[in-house]
Image (tube, helix red, strand yellow):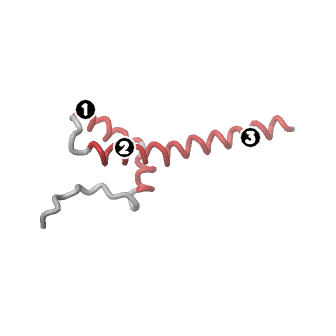
Amino acid sequence: MESIFNNSFATLIAYIGVISIYLLVIPLFLFYWMNNRWNVMGKFERLGIYGLVFLFFPGLILFSPFLNLRLRGSDKG
């Protein structure tokens, strides 16, 4: 009986780990990468980032209300 509990617990931990990486870790890394490299990306890097944005879209949607990727304008005005 303990073997079933341990397998279920290990499975639950694995699911939580995969979901947290998919919804939290990689989207935050993508936001960081896009924020720092947006104006200097090459075309292949941009294509790769767009592919990752498509792949990790649910996690990016979770963080989109809290993060700002607008360009920093000049301080003149």
Q: Quadrant of residue 14?
A: top right
Query: On the image, numbered disc 1 is attached to which residue?
Result: 44
Q: Amino acid at mark 1?
A: Phe
Q: How far is mark 2 from mark 3, CA to CA?
A: 32 Å
Q: Earlier in the sequence, mark 2 or mark 3?
A: 3
Q: Residue at x 41, y 44 (%)?
A: 29
The x, y position of residue 4, in whole percent, is: 80, 37
Numbered disc 2: secondary structure = helix
Q: Residue at x 13, y 63 (%)?
A: 76
Query: On the image, numbered disc 3 is attached to which residue?
Result: 8
Q: Is residue 35 left or right of residue 27?
A: left
Q: Residues within 10 Å of mark 3 (few under 14, many from 20)?
A: few
Image quadrant holding the N terminus, namely: top right
**As displayed, is residue 52 above or below residue 70?**
above
Q: Amino acid at mark 3?
A: Ser
Q: Residues within 10 Å of mark 2 (few under 14, many from 20)?
A: few
Residues 8 and 33: in front is: 33
Query: On the image, numbered disc 2 is attached to which residue?
Result: 54
Tags 1 and 2 in contact by the CB under 8 Å rule?
A: no
